[in-house]
Amino acid sequence: MDMTLCISKRYVIFTIILCIASAGIGCLFAIMGQSLYAAETELFNYSTGIEYPDWVGTVLGVGFGLLVGVLYTCKLISLVENDLGRIPLKGTLYGIIAGVACSTLLHTVLIIIHKGNSAVPFIWGAIFGGIAGLFLGFISSMIFKSIYKR
């Protein structure tokens, strides 16, 4: 069997698994974020004029998580040719950036939907997104490096 074909299959499988993990984490955090925005809307008794279903945040989290997962994987693959030895470090840093980016996208849309005016969700979202990106970025970059070595 051609080695290039084996490597490309590994990349595809890795990408699918990583994107599923990224979408899952995005979904989990989006559910929490959506519930906080909904609770704030009720607590302060203001209406946005439009009722959004509870699953809007979940769908956004999955979508943004998937998008960021694909972009992160593409960036990780681009490191193979130039910087193989630094994949774990750069992969972890790019993971943190990806987590913060996903969180920022999600909270931007949720703030618009719920007509929020506080920066607090961005701050907490960036913290949680960065931590999730740190762990997922580190784990995935180590797995990716081991796949490439085979």
Image (cartoon, rainbow, N blue to C red):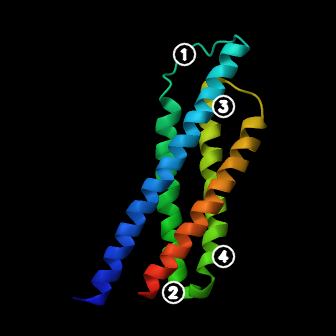
Pointer 4 residue: 89
Relative horizontal placement of residue 9, taking residue 21 as reference (left or right): left
- Nearer the observer, 137 or 112: 137
**Position of 28 relative to 52 (above/below):** below
Pointer 3 residue: 111
**Position of 3 relative to 64 (above/below):** below
- Would you identify the image quadrant in which residue 93 lies? bottom right
Tell me which label, 4 or 3, sits earlier in the chain.
4
C-alpha separation, residue under disc 2 versus residue under disc 1: 50 Å
The percent position of residue 113, horizontal first and vertical second, equals: 60, 27
Relative horizontal placement of residue 107, taking residue 20 as reference (left or right): right
Q: Amino acid at mark 2?
A: Glu
Circle number at residue 81? 2
Pointer 1 residue: 50
Tell me which label, 2 or 1, sits earlier in the chain.
1
Relative horizontal placement of residue 7, taking residue 121 as reference (left or right): left
Helix, strand, or loop for circle 2? helix
